[in-house]
Image (cartoon, coloured by chain):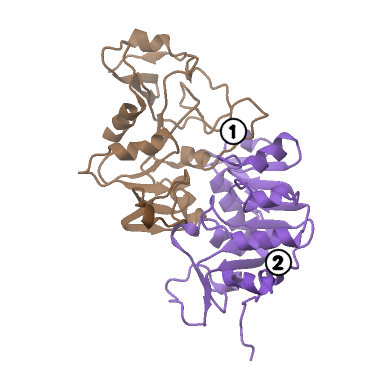
Chain colours: A purple, B brown
Amino acid sequence: MIVMNKTCESLRAAVADIADGSVVMIGGFGNSGIPLQLIEALRQHGARDLTIISNNAGVAEIGIASLLKAGQVRKIVCSFPRSSGSIWFERLYEAGDIELELVPQGTLGERIRAAGAGLGGVYTPTGYGTRLAEGKETKVINGKGFVLETALPADVALIKAHRADVWGNLIYNTAGRNFNPIMATAATTTIAEVSDVVSAGELDPECIVTPGIFVDRVVTQEASRHDAA
Amino acid sequence: MMRLNSDEMARRVAQDIPDGAYVNLGIGMPTSVANHVSDDRLVIYHSENGILGVGPAPAPDQVDPDLINAGKQYVTLLQGGCYFDNAESFAMMRGGHLDIAVLGAFQVSERGDLANWATNDDTFPPAVGGAMDLAVGAKQLFVLMRHTTKANEPKILNQCHYPLTGAGVVKRIYTDLAVIDVTEEGLRVRELYGDNTLADVQALTEARLLPPL
């Protein structure tokens, strides 16, 4: 019988198979619940021509902004790219060096959720009659207008959780869950950065937020020590 | 002409937030409404990133870096509060579970159209966040904004010139001059501050205003 252990010993190994041109989801809302060490590993790995799906586009020179600065991102799909300090996004946008797909935040979440749930898309009232619905199919249901928004899957999801067990079950810290649980469901390969990994059975099953079936690899923040060696 | 300052504007909105309401406050001036709700009312604040029961800012040694509000400021959780993911958070919005949302605006039309996410300046990168979801989903959408632009141009218009956040979504407008309801008949003044007259406020409003009932 197999001994299931999704722990990956090194951050570098966890992201080693991310190919050029990949669609990569990155969890987080601002700097809350963002997998900074996996992003740094992806930067060092150097995959290019990436499409990034995330709520924000990074600030200063850390996290997603570090991938923008390194020229690894072709397109970003997000709801709120412009924040105080989002200098790299603004620089690339003004120069026409990055493609932006702007999606209302709830629609971004539902498109991700639809992909993870095997749906083709969802009809949402959000954005109906606005510029962000232009060119999209609409439908009036029970007298109310809806926009068809299609599922948004990814090749890889980089997510951040508080704690994992070796089966890949995850729990989160406070508001750090945000996009992480839904992104976990929507990617071919989901990689979770966590503070620590415990044995199967140590997490209270009533409290598990992300079931392990959605998670392929877990890597602790400690794993960077292996990479330095 | 009496013009309220931003604190007074936020306080006026706070008076209309009922005890026991579930409320989402937009970033900027709307966030400060929470500072003015009287202590004898329980209001449960929703934050789009996945919090119900947002509490005040933490002491500097009590900061949890993951525990932030929509404006990315550190907050706390009230006793009885909870966390959830983005999909559940926006289900609360679109599903009509929030009693009140308070948002800022660039422009509002006489039909209650809201424009608050983009201007017509295409060199400036747009950002929409959760505004469109709140606009369509909250049971009541209140706008809190100055009555005119810095150049003293009207922001309450026959039609919005900026891209819409939502069509026909605004229920009430709180400005520094007056409180105005969006009704079937049109924009009806609910309250004029100080000795402001309907004519004074109309002069700074493009859309036609109906007198208070």
In the image, residue B28 lies at what x, y percent?
Answer: 44, 35
Which of the labelled discs sits on residue A130, or is there none?
1
Query: Which quadrant: the C terminus of chain B?
Result: top left
Instruction: Measure the alpha-carbon separation of dots 2 and 1.
Output: 39 Å
What is the quadrant of residue A113 in the picture? bottom right
Residue drawn at the location 62% of the way across and 37% of the way down = A132
What is the quadrant of residue A16 in the picture? bottom right
Left or right of A33? Residue A9 is right
Residue lying furthest front: A229
Q: Which residue is mark 2?
A: A15
Residue A118 in sight in this render: no
Tag 1: amino acid:
Thr
- Indicate whether A36 appears above or below B212: below
In the image, residue A50 lies at what x, y percent?
Answer: 74, 53
Chain hosting mark 1? A
Left or right of A183? Residue B11 is left
Q: Are marks 2 and 1 on the same chain?
A: yes
Q: Nearer the viewer, residue B66 or A212?
A: B66
**Depth-wise, is mark 2 or mark 1 nearer the camera?**
2
- Element at label 1: loop
Chain hosting mark 2? A
